[in-house]
Amino acid sequence: MTDSQDQDKIVSLSAKRQSKHQPTPRFRIRRFDEIDLGDKPEYLLDGFIPRGATTMVYGKPGSCKSLWALDVALHVAQGFPYRGRDVFAGPVIFVAFEGGEGMPKRVAAWDQEHKPGPHARRFYLMEQESMLLADDWQALVDAIRTRLRQDQQPDPVLVILDTLNRGIQDENSNKEMVGYLNACDSISKALDGCAVLIVHHTLHDTDRPRGHSSAMGNCSGLISMEWNAPAVVATVTKMKDGRTGEQMASKTRQVMLPHDRKGIPRTSVVLDAAELPTKAAPARLTKGLATFKAAVRAAIDQWPVEHGEHKVTSLQDVRAKHKLLYEHNGKGDADKAERVAWRRGLARAFAVNLIDRATVEVEGYATDILWLVS
């Protein structure tokens, strides 16, 4: 054996010894050519709820946010498309911290109206008054796994937490809100990358989620629920690596259920698909909407592009103009306040039919364009 072969053998044996005794690295580091895009579906509900991430649906009382979340959950468990959008089917856990007493009737109404097959058994309801999610997330994961294994089911594809304020002591605390959202991420990772959907309330007389603003910053997706008679409209106001402004509409319908044992009639409600309502822009714009409209107009004036019968501009250009035009009130962090105003303005502009959008291909890349409707 040559000296070179001896050296190679020594290096090989040394490497084997090191690999045998080295602990498993805590952090995974991948080289450029080891980064794989993969082919797994990105969304649990196409365009609305991403897989492996935390999404928040929020709205005022009566905006049907819990009913919408339940309707989505039951469609996902059954594998039914939702409002014409694909779903990633599988077991679903609905944790009802509030309104749990009405859930059995809503589930019975959905069952009666949709007549699902055996896959509906993949929907699970957990009625719980409250828990501190930051402390109890592992116990929740263990309970979910134990119940699903009894039915020989895999990990869930979706966990719904209704509502946020029943799983946290102080929703206005940055530390507690971050702890809550970290717990949501831990649940997702522990349960094979399931999606987590939080149901939350809005501030009184506003359209932003209640509590500390870190909730908006740390969620991958935000969905606003707004009652716009005769329909309730779900609007994507934030989507990391996705499109904002996606909308779907639903309408409530009363359902008669079997009488109770005393012969008293019982009713519940279900959601049906509806047409998106057309809503004219208000005669007098709020300050936030006026700033947003001015940003769209400034971007169109500086970089006008024809698209059909409209003069349009890119979403990116409007974003740049909004940063220049936004006037901070001097309270708190100016950059953070502008980002919140931007997301709110974008959602409201769609909701009141101030703007419309399309996606076009520019130099091989998908680009979002906007134009003023009114």
Image (cartoon, rainbow, N blue to C red):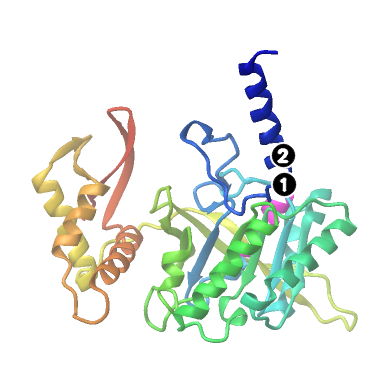
Q: Position of residue 93 (x, y in %)?
A: 72, 63
Q: Position of residue 26 (x, y in %)?
A: 61, 54
User: Who's the residue at 58% across and 62% down the image?
Assistant: 185
Q: Which mark is residue 21?
A: 1
User: Who's the residue at 68% across and 47% down the image?
Assistant: 22
Tell me whether circle 2 and circle 1 mark residues in contact (CB < 8 Å).
yes
Between 135 and 114, the residue placed more toward the observer is 135
Secondary structure of residue under mark 2 = helix
Q: Which mark is residue 262?
A: none
Q: Is residue 82 left or right of residue 342?
A: right
Q: Position of residue 176 (x, y in %)?
A: 52, 80
Secondary structure of residue under mark 1 = helix
Inspect the magenta stretch and tell me whether residue 72 lies in it.
Answer: yes
Inspect the magenta stretch and tell me whether residue 323 lies in it.
Answer: no
Using the rendered view, name the quadrant where residue 259 is placed.
bottom right
Q: Three-letter amino acid code at disc 2?
A: Arg
Q: Quadrant of the C terminus?
A: bottom left
How many C-alpha atoms fall within 10 Å of the one at disc 2: few (<14), some, or many (≥20)?
few
Magenta stretch in the rendered image? 69-79
Q: Is residue 227 left or right of residue 291?
A: right
- Residue 313 vertical position relative to residue 139 in the rendered view, above or below: above
Q: Is residue 117 visible?
A: no
In space, the residues marked 2 and 1 are separated at their CA atoms by 6 Å
Q: Which residue is mark 2?
A: 17
Using the rendered view, name the quadrant where residue 188 is placed.
bottom right
Q: Quadrant of the N terminus?
A: top right
Q: Three-letter amino acid code at disc 1?
A: His
**Helix, strand or loop: magenta stretch:** helix
How many C-alpha atoms fall within 10 Å of the one at disc 1: few (<14), some, or many (≥20)?
few
